[in-house]
Amino acid sequence: MSPAPESPPTLRHEFKFVLDEAATRDLELWLRTSSLGLRTAHQDRLVHNLYFDTLEADSVADKLAGLSHRAKVRYRWYGARAAPDAGQLEVKRRANGSGWKETYRVDAAPSAESRGAFVRALRAAVPPRARAWLATYPEPMLINRYRRAYFVSCDGEVRATVDRDLSVWDQRVGRFPQCAQAASMPRLTVLELKFAPTDRARVATELSDLGFVASACSKYELGVRAISG
């Protein structure tokens, strides 16, 4: 059973677009000219995520089945280091179309001598509630990496990220962490916009002339498809 929320979450809505190379020029023009007044929030970063799931990939299955309540567990760190570094355990939650995130800071890089050593060290570094999530989704599934650009609207109410150069490494078998042989991935750009439920109509109107089709496909789902062939 998944842990219950500790307190009422701050709900956010999200629009996501998975774009091929041909669409990136239109995206760059929209970022410069949108009436949202998007500006750079801070410098670009390399983002690494180690995703946890069951052996049957229940997290992906729940999403594909359209379950209204679901979760996704990952360990995130920033910078060029390929092996897990100091970072944070994140649990992305969704319920009835809205989402929120639980974050648990990890100040020192968990041991990566083996898959089991890493999981044990991570469990020891987080509180009981986070350990319960790791018990629900116990298996290191994949690592992905991308370069993320950050934007915020002029009123601070809408945040946008643009992810490029997505790479994926299978972590299910063999030496851990496996960061040498990346799975085959198409060259994609992912645009995500996050906003309060009250801003949904405003953001949808701004996006109506962009011509992009919103996608329900996550970077984790793309990664699972890549490592599964």
Image (tube, rainbow, N blue to C red):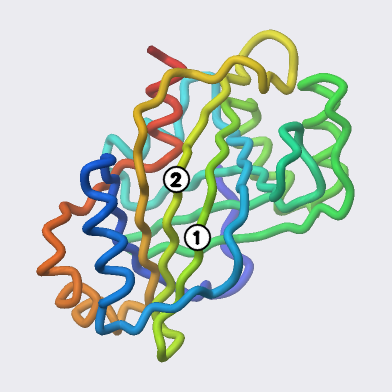
Where residue 110 sits, quadrant-wise, is top right
Residue 127 lies, in percent from the top left, at: 80, 54
Residue drawn at 81 percent across, 48 percent down: 86
Q: Residue furthest bottom?
A: 155
Residue drawn at 25 percent across, 68 percent down: 30
Q: Nearer the viewer, residue 15 or 184?
A: 184
Q: Nearer the viewer, residue 8 or 103?
A: 103
Q: Secondary structure at mark 2?
A: strand
Q: Relative to 112, is 96 above or below?
A: below
Q: Which mark is residue 54?
A: none
Q: Is residue 173 left or right of residue 163?
A: right
Where residue 74 sits, quadrant-wise, is top right
Q: Relative to 225, is 10 above or below?
A: below
Residue 131 lies, in percent from the top left, at: 74, 44
Q: Amino acid at mark 1?
A: Ala
Q: Secondary structure at mark 1?
A: strand
Residue 18 lies, in percent from the top left, at: 29, 45
Q: Amino acid at mark 2?
A: Arg
Sequence-first tag of 2 and 1: 1
- The residue that label 1 is drawn on is 149
Q: Residues within 10 Å of mark 1 (few under 14, many from 20)?
A: some
- The residue that label 2 is drawn on is 164
